[in-house]
Image (cartoon, rainbow, N blue to C red):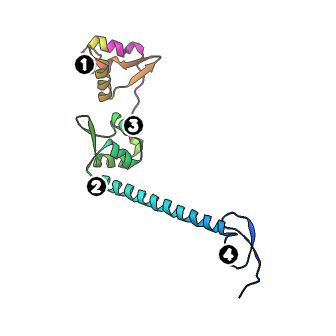
Amino acid sequence: MSSKIEITRICEFCKNEFTARTTKTLYCSLKCSSRAYKARVRQAKIDKSENQTKQVKNVNLEAIKAKDYIDVNLASNLLGISKRTIYRLIARGELDIAKFGRRTIIRRCDLDSFFSTPLDQALLRPVQEFPGIENCYNIMQIQQKFKISAGALYTLIQRHGLAKYSIGKFNYVAKRDIDIIFNAGDYEKD
């Protein structure tokens, strides 16, 4: 039995208008039908590949979450932030670390406790006022007076959390703070 129905439809693939002889016809031609089939197969392969990738990533995250100690690379993958950001947190003293040679290790409990503390407390550290240039040493003066290298000096400043003041191209540190660190003894007590 043949049908003499003529229905105006729009092709699902090329979006052109065509006359269909059945109510179930989706495509205007065999060419559009085969192209649509190939597109469906291609998309199914892409979706399958993406699902496999997500599963592998989730397995890796689960393995990372199970570890008590992780390195900076794993921490950056776990948190979804860059390694440089983690190193900045470490430099500011907001994350505790352990060093094994050149390798930096972070405890999971320290990483978890970092996010459990309110960020306002970490951001609201008291800011020391600039004491004036006459009450400060520049970096070169400190190096010459106490015979210390620039790297060691910056490490001490960072370790003790001393405020550095940049004026022009020079960095200054309060004389009182430096004298306390080097036990110079000639600082004034308030």
Residue farthest toward the bottom in the current orientation of the protein: 1
List the residue tagged with mark 1. Answer: 182
**Residue at horizontal 30 percent and vertical 19 percent from the top:** 178
Residue 126 is inside the magenta segment: yes
Mark number, residue 25: 4
Q: Residues within 10 Å of mark 4 (few under 14, many from 20)?
A: some
Seen in the picture, residue 170 relative to 62 is either above or below; the reply is above
Q: What amino acid is at disc 1?
A: Phe
**Residue at horizontal 42 percent and vertical 24 percent from the top:** 129
| Helix, strand or loop for disc 2 | helix
| Helix, strand or loop for disc 4 | loop
Magenta range is 122-142
Give the quarter of the figure containing the C terminus. Answer: top left
Is there a contact, CB below 8 Å, between mark 2 and mark 4? no
List the residue tagged with mark 3. Answer: 84
Choose top left, top right, bottom left or bottom right for residue 91. Answer: top left
Q: Residues within 10 Å of mark 3 (few under 14, many from 20)?
A: few
The mark nearer the N terminus, 2 or 4, is 4
The mark nearer the N terminus, 1 or 3, is 3
Q: How far separated are the C-alphas under marks 4 and 3?
A: 57 Å
Q: What amino acid is at disc 4?
A: Thr
